[in-house]
Amino acid sequence: MNDQKHLWKPWDEENFSNPYPMYKALQQSDPIHFSQTKEWIITRYEDVRTVLRDNRFVAGNRLDWIKRGIAYLNNKEMDFQAIASAMSHFLLFLNPPQHTRVRKFIHSVWTNRDIEPLIRSGTRDLISQLPKQQFDIVKDFGQVLPALTMANILGIPSADHRYLKSLALNLIKAMDLYISVKDLVLIHQSAKEFIDYFSVTLQEKRMKEDGLLHKIIVANEKSDEPLTNNELISISIFLFTAGVETTSGVIGTGVYNLINRNQWHERDPEAWDLCIDELLRYDSPVQLLGRISTEEIELGGKTIPKGSTVTLCLGAANRDPELFDQPDELILTRNQNRHLAFGSGIHFCMGDWLGKLQARIALEELVKTYPTSSAVTQDLKWNKNLAIRSLTEFKVAVT
């Protein structure tokens, strides 16, 4: 019984680098598991998908947790209010009707999706600047490309993309369910700088007229229910941050998995599409999502009380043997790949198309430019964040 209580080990170092054995143990012995951390851990595909599509489970527990932590630390004369302000209108934390209003507004403005030439041009320019023979695919390329892409899409100065990328990499730590006060200090500073940056950018309209931010401002001025300035700032931060971290993770782990399995070669566009979906399934950049039950709910033979915190393991669901044949194998020609890497239901990631497009173009151009690649880094360093899976560095030798 004691072993059953400790199937969920979110702080164990080994699970940052490889959480899949832990997921499998949960799936096999207790797929709807009430853990020692006082949360329900859901690992089966159908259960995860059910919760994501059930409006009785609401988003927001992550932001509520942050706010509770901030209130507690405020009493100790530690001010972290900027974190809540920066993330207050992140779509993944909102519920209807706020979620519906904000998502509908962004969709109405973000109409230009013909951006493949922009991404391909940026990718080629970035590759041309990479160090010769050896470079870090994460730091020199994977983290830089999506930041540059989002700067260009938003219409803010492209020269700012590296600075904003560093802020985004810190802010995304708030997605981790198990962070320290030291992490909060770092997140808070980045949140403050993000707020300052977009406050000035929006107020002084420091963006291109054909960029998404300018279109957002114009549409908001014409709206019958305009968003507040604080909402606009938070949405701007969300668009940039969401567009950077997950794509960075796919590129870094994608290059690693292709090289490690001797699958580094050119493909036609359709084969690349299948490849990207399989890389997303096999090593999902977003591993965990949180929900709160708004009433007592029966799920898979268990009773989840009202107000419970529910943690959905997307990484586990994407390797559920009930849905995927050979789930622990990377099969790059896998068809009908119904992975949950971008979630499901009303919170399905609205930038899924952009993340997949960037990852495909990035890998296409890298393979084309460097037909031979090998790993230099042997001792892999993974981000110490169970919710967001990514390498912090991965050096490769190329020819």
Image: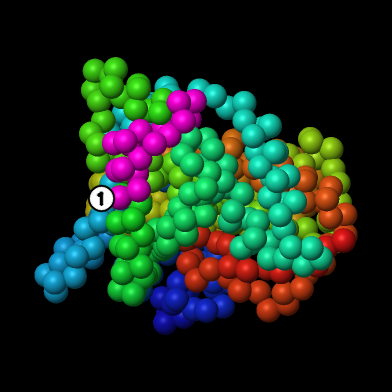
Q: Quadrant of residue 274?
A: top right
Q: Give coordinates of residue 5: x percent, y percent.
A: 41, 76
Q: Is residue 168 left or right of residue 326?
A: left
Q: Give coordinates of residue 316: x percent, y percent.
A: 56, 58
Name the outermost residue toward the bottom: 2
Give me the residue at 30% from left, 62% from top.
188
Give me the residue at 77% from left, 42% from top.
272
Nearest the viewer among 343 and 300 is: 343
- Tell me the kind of residue under disc 1: Ser
Q: Is residue 209 visible?
A: yes
Give me the residue at 61% from left, 45% from top.
339
Q: Quadrant of the N terminus?
A: bottom left
Q: Give coordinates of residue 122: x percent, y percent.
A: 66, 42
* Relative to 281, residue 216 above or below: above
Q: Give coordinates of residue 48: x percent, y percent.
A: 48, 49
* Relative to 77, residue 352 above or below: above
The residue labelled by disc 1 is 85
Residues in magenta?
196-213
Q: Is residue 277 visible?
A: no
Q: Quadrant of the C terminus?
A: bottom right
